[in-house]
Structure formats: structure tokens, C-alpha cells
């Protein structure tokens, strides 16, 4: 982790609801393996680990004035629901401005019709 000092650092922490993570994993598992997802100990421990790590990161941010000033916390769900608004917030936090090319790219790559990420 970056140490305090003269570092002009900005961090963006993308957090996702663990229920959404589990839902995505179930869909991927079923699509790739054509088998039902089993909520076994290994899978549940992996999800518990995500929760613990997220809590730990959020606590570090909360308890450090240096990190608080330099960190933007973005919820995945908010980004998915309002990609234009949240992207503008991320860009502004980063010292950048949204422009028509970025707006167009977001529109093209976040619509339900989109088949790939354009990357």
C-alpha cells in the first residue's frame, strides 16, 4: 500500500454487493460447465473472503485521513445502473472531464444490445 508523503495518488475502490458476485459466479458456472452451481464450503469460503477483504479495505479508508482524501468508493451496482453519472464522477475525481467521445463509448458499451466491451 502507498505510504503517506508527497505522493499525488488517487484510488478508486470498486465495491460490489457479495450477492451480485455470487449470482454472477452461478451464471458463469452454469454456462461454462452446464451443471448446477453447488454452494459448497469452498465456494462459500471464497465469498466470505471477498466480504472480509472488502470490510478491511473500507476500514482502512475510514481510519486514515490520508486515504479518505484520496479515495473514491464506487459501488458496482451504481455504476451499472447509472454509467454516465458514475463515469463522470470517476473522471472528475481523477482530474479529467467527460466528453462526447466518452459518452458515446459508454452508451455503446453499456446498452443491453452490446455484445462486447469494445476494449
Image: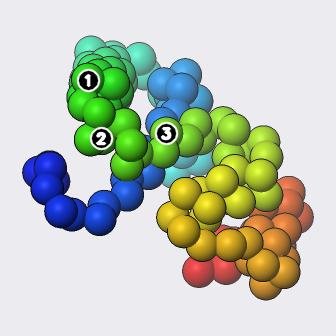
Q: Nearer the viewer, residue 78 or 49?
A: 78
Q: Residues within 10 Å of mark 1 (few under 14, many from 20)?
A: few
Q: Nearer the viewer, residue 57 or 48?
A: 57
Q: Mark 3 points at which residue?
A: 73
Q: Mark 2 points at which residue?
A: 67
x, y (%) of residue 103?
81, 72
Quick one: label 1 or label 3, which is nearer the N terminus? 1
Q: Considering the numbered disc 3 on the image, is that residue within a helix, a strand or a loop?
A: strand
Q: Considering the numbered disc 2 on the image, is that residue within a helix, a strand or a loop?
A: helix
Would you say residue 53 is visible in this rendering? no
Q: Is residue 64 above or below residue 113?
A: above
Quick one: label 2 or label 3, which is nearer the N terminus? 2
Marks 1 and 2: CB-CB under 8 Å?
no
x, y (%) of residue 44?
34, 18
Kindly identify which numbered label has been placed on residue 63.
1
Q: How crowded is mark 2: few (under 14 residues within 10 Å), some or many (20 or more)?
A: some
Who's the residue at 66% across and 53% down the image?
89
Q: In this view, does 74 lie above or below 9?
A: above
Who's the residue at 61% across and 64% down the image?
91
Q: Considering the numbered disc 1 on the image, is that residue within a helix, a strand or a loop?
A: loop
Q: In this view, does 8 lie above or below 23?
A: below
Marks 2 and 3: CB-CB under 8 Å?
no
Amino acid at each position: 500500500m502507498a505510504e503517506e508523503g508527497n505522493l499525488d495518488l488517487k484510488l478508486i475502490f470498486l465495491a460490489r454487493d457479495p450477492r451480485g458476485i455470487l449470482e454472477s459466479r452461478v451464471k458463469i458456472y452454469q454456462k461454462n460447465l452446464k451443471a448446477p452451481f453447488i454452494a459448497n464450503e469452498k465456494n462459500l469460503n471464497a465469498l466470505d473472503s471477498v466480504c472480509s477483504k472488502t470490510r478491511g479495505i473500507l476500514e482502512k479508508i475510514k481510519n486514515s485521513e490520508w486515504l479518505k482524501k484520496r479515495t473514491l468508493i464506487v459501488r458496482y451496482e451504481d455504476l451499472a445502473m447509472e454509467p454516465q453519472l458514475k463515469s463522470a464522477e470517476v473522471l472528475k475525481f481523477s482530474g479529467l472531464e467527460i466528453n462526447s467521445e466518452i459518452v458515446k463509448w459508454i452508451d455503446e458499451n453499456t446498452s443491453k444490445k452490446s455484445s462486447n466491451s469494445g476494449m
